[in-house]
Every structure is written in structure tokens, then in C-alpha cells.
Image (spheres, coloured by chain):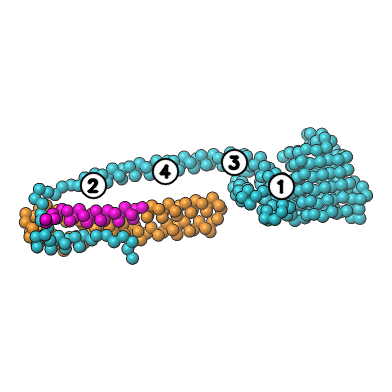
Chain colours: A cyan, B orange
Amino acid sequence: MKLFKPRYASDVAAELVSGLLDGSIVLDRSESVQVHEGLNRRSWIYLVAFAMLTTLLTLIFRIRIIADRITIDMALMVSAEASTVITTYLTQKPSEKDVTKLSNQIRVLSRLTGSGSQQREVIAAVVAAKAVEASARIPYTPDSDIKNVTLDLAGNAAGAIFVTRDTFISNVKLMSSVPKPDETGIWIQGSPVVVAYRVIIENLTQNIDGIFWYEPVFRNCKIISGGGPIRIYNGTFVKCRSDATVSRITKLKTFIESGSGSFHKE
Amino acid sequence: MARTAQQVIESALKENRFSEIALYACILLLFLVGLAIVLWTVWLNQAWASTCGPAISLLVIPMLKQLRDIRQEKLKLRLIEVPLGIATTEKAAAAAIVRIFEQGLKKL
């Protein structure tokens, strides 16, 4: 099937032959064989097209160079960007449009290479984003692997939450009705990415590194640190004490004693 | 009033020119749509959907074939002008067209 049917030269030739023989078509004596200007015009068109194509390719090449540069800059910004994304997810009620936009942003970020701690932050953002994405269509309650529970450790011997894989913990209260300073609230084995969102810990010992804390509340706790990266967003410390592991980290002890705020250490 | 042979050829060329431009436009449009789909799906990270782009762009192949045919016809029409310019009488011109068409242009 032909979309546009051309006027065939054979048809025109047949028409000319019959026309010339019966006299309906005559030869124009004033016209002679000439080289049509169309050929020259066509050459100009090819030349301009070639110039445009070259310019386009140059531009694409330039854009690629710029894009590479942006990628490098982006890699450097991963840390700050991921923190912003996580915070946006966890502290605001995002619309569906925002969720889609931020999910795309996280996908872009997760493709970038960065240092180990930057990658961990991006993974944390993905963990948090997935949880929020799942619950974006219902009244805002961040979904999680462990949520909305109160655990009393008065009768337990080991840590309340034992985490070995990437986990999102939200709205969990870990406490001991009897002060048990040697018991650990959240215990991590290996190096999973753990996001703790609005977790309350009371009368226990907690190692604060290796967990991404969002609005945690520590009451009458013993805070320790293994020296790993620390991320605390809007935390509250009430009557907490720390040991030598905390004192070794610059400003961390002061931060815990100050009672509230955010802390960040790689 | 009798038409001249040149007028007949020019009118045929004019008809073909419209088809040629329309085909160029369609080819460009399909190519751009295909490219846009590829870029869009890459941006959305949907690898499977990006195959639709080249699939749409493949539709230009029959159009390119048709475009080639039209250009060939255009060339043939231009070549018909040669015997018309050389011939001194209408009868000789008609004979030349028939002869040249049978011998040479069929091979184009």
C-alpha cells in the first residue's frame, strides 16, 4: 500500500507521446535543454543540512561533557541531597505528585557512585521512600517493618529489637519498667541500613551509630557509640548519660547533654 | 490551446513534489516521536518501554522506500526533457521518447 502515489514517468511519457502525435501537445521551440537550478539549490540544502547536523552533534557532545560534569557534582552532593529527601519524606505529608518526583530523584541519586557512607544514605532514603510510597494514598502513617508497638524489656534478657537486615522502624516505644542500664534497645548485627522514625527508648542502653534516627526520644538512657556514622534528626535526650565511647567523639557528648537537636557525623 | 511538453512535465513534477515533502515530514515526525519515546522512557527508567521508540522509528522504512521511488520518478521525468530539447519535430520527439524509455529509463 502506498501512502502517496507518485505520478509515474512512464505515464507522463505515454501522455506526451500520444499528445505529440495527435497535436494536443506541442514542442516549445524557445526552450532548450538546460541544467536546472534545482541541482544547485539542492547542493545548498545539503550543505546547510550538513552544517546543521555538525552543529547538532557538537552540541550533543558538549551536552554530554556538561552532563558528566553535573554527574560528578551530583555525586558530591549525594549526602546533602539524600538527607533532604529523607527528611522531606519523613516530616511532611507528601502528595502523590511529590512522591513520584522524589522517587525519581532517589532513583537518579541511587545510580550515582559515591563513598560508602553516601551510598548508605541513599539506601536509607530508598528504604524510607518505599515505606512512605506504600502509604501515600492513605492517611499519612509511614509504613514500616516494625511499627506501632510498645515493648517492655523488664522480663527480657537480650536487646528488644534485633536487626540483621535493612529495616524501617516507626512509632515504636522500647522501655523497661525497671531501669536496666545494661540492656540494649535496638541491637544491630552486620551492617544493615536501619531507619528509626519516632522511636522512644526509655531506661535502656542504646548504641546510636549505624542507625538513621528521625525524631527519636531517649529518656533516662545510657548512650554509647561504636564510632560509626551518626545521623540524628531532631532528637530529644532527657536525663541521658553517656560513657567514654561518646566522649571520644567531638561535640557528641555536648549534643546529648544539650537535650535536643540534630547531629551528623560521618 | 495546445499545451507544451515542458508544461506537462512540470505539472507532473509539481504533483510529485507534494508527495515528497509530505513523506519527508512524516519520516521526520516518526523519527522524532521514536526518539522522544526512547529519551522519555530512559528518563523514567523504564527499560522495557524504551523498545517502543525504535519500533515506531522502524515505520519509516516503507516511507523511505516510497520516497526513493518518488525521487527516481522525478529523475526520469527530468531525463524525458533531453530528447524533447534535441528533437525538431513532434513526431521525432515522440519516437525519441519511446525509444529512450524502452531502452534506458526502464533500467533506472
Please name the residue shown 45% across and 52% down the image.
B35
Residue identified by numbered label 1: A90
Label 4 Cα neighbours within 10 Å, binned few <14 / some 14-19 / many ≥20: few
Circle 3: residue type: Met
Question: Where does the image place residue A145, in percent across and percent down from the top left?
Answer: 75, 56
Circle 4: residue type: Leu
Residue identified by numbered label 4: A57
Residue identified by numbered label 2: A38
Residue A230 seen: no
| Same subunit: marks 2 and 4 | yes
Label 3 Cα neighbours within 10 Å, binned few <14 / some 14-19 / many ≥20: some
| Same subunit: marks 1 and 2 | yes
Quadrant including the N terminus of chain A: bottom left
Q: Earlier in the sequence, mark 1 or mark 3?
A: 3
Q: Earlier in the sequence, mark 2 or mark 3?
A: 2
CA gap between label 4 and label 1 equals 44 Å
Is residue A81 shown in magenta?
no
**Magenta span covers which residues?**
B1-25
Residue identified by numbered label 3: A74
